[in-house]
Amino acid sequence: MNVTKYEKHVEALSPQTLFTGQQLVWLPECASTNTEAQQLVGQNRATDGCCVITDKQTAGRGQRGNQWEAAPGENLTLSVVWRPAFLPAADQFLLSQVVALAVHDWLIMLLGPDDQLRVKWPNDIFFGNRKLGGILIENTLSGTKIQHSIVGIGLNVNQREFGVATATSLAQLTGRAYDLPTLAARLLESLERRYLQLRAGRVGNLRAEYLRVLYRFQEEHTYEAEGHTFRGQIVGVDEAGRLALAAAGQLHYFDLKEIRYLV
């Protein structure tokens, strides 16, 4: 394993993988692991599977342009570089499904099977109605192909107190503390397993499994879109990654910033 800059607990973070996490850049502090990973790619210093991980992220990015906040040294904050040249740009949402399922798999290993453990479209991780983690994937396209993907993941692990009531952590759920390097290694292994599924072309299985763990799937709930509040039921996700929602006898499709979940 090629480890640079920050070598704390290196031995514990030794994922049993072919390439994901075999190049490891561990930083004591950075603005954003996605930004650091992007810079490594731009400098031609990132191999396929390169992982950037930090103890303290000062300007982490989330979906919808939100900031991802995490207490220093208590959570997992990392980014992985993949080069999925096999995947057409039109199918890039499959990467979101792969990563969300990998994190879900990893959490099942830690918490056991639990119906409260769900993926909130497109790829937030929820336990019940509280957020355990978030994923931000930034793809760089070259024509109809994906040149490289930066997979950013933030997971609440040992943090016990949050500024919002809708957040939770593994420590809150189980009452125990976790060794972060060991958990990071298991997460990288989980990510590679799901990624290899995609590379092998098992697309149907991935899409079906994503729906099985999708938050609010086939349940009646309240949503807001274009300033209107309505009741509807999530019935699927199309190939472009749009949320399919049935309401008032009609099927509607929504992109990321077009719909808001209401309690």
Image (tube, rainbow, N blue to C red):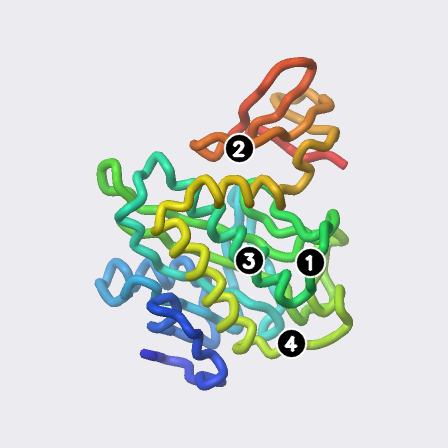
State the mark number for residue 113: 1
Query: Which of the marked residues, 1 or 2, is nearer the chain's N terminus?
Result: 1
| Type of amino acid at the residue the image marks with label 4 | Tyr
Q: Nearer the viewer, mark 3 or mark 1?
A: 1
In the rendered image, which quarter contains the C terminus?
A: top right
Q: What residue lies at 47% left-to-right and 50% top-to-bottom? A: 98
**Distance CA(mark 4)–CA(mark 3):** 16 Å
Report the side of 165 relative to 28 (left or right).
right
Toward the viewer: 80 or 66? Answer: 80
Which residue in the protein does label 2 denote? 237
Report the side of 146 relative to 235 (left or right).
left
Q: What residue lies at 54% left-to-right and 77% top-to-bottom? A: 182
Query: Which of the marked residues, 2 or 4, is nearer the chain's N terminus?
Result: 4
State the image coordinates of residue 80 (x, y, percent, origin top left): 40, 61
Query: Which of the marked residues, 2 or 3, is nearer the chain's N terminus?
Result: 3
Q: Are marks 4 and 3 in contact (CB under 8 Å)?
A: no
Report the side of 117 relative to 146 (left or right).
right
Which SS class for mark 2?
Answer: strand
State the image coordinates of residue 1 (x, y, percent, origin top left): 34, 79
Report the side of 54 relative to 25 (left or right).
right
Which residue in the protein does label 4 denote? 178
| Type of amino acid at the residue the image marks with label 1 | Pro
Q: Nearer the viewer, mark 2 or mark 4?
A: 2
| Type of amino acid at the residue the image marks with label 3 | Val
Query: Which of the marked residues, 4 or 3, is nearer the chain's N terminus?
Result: 3
State the image coordinates of residue 203 (x, y, percent, origin top left): 42, 42
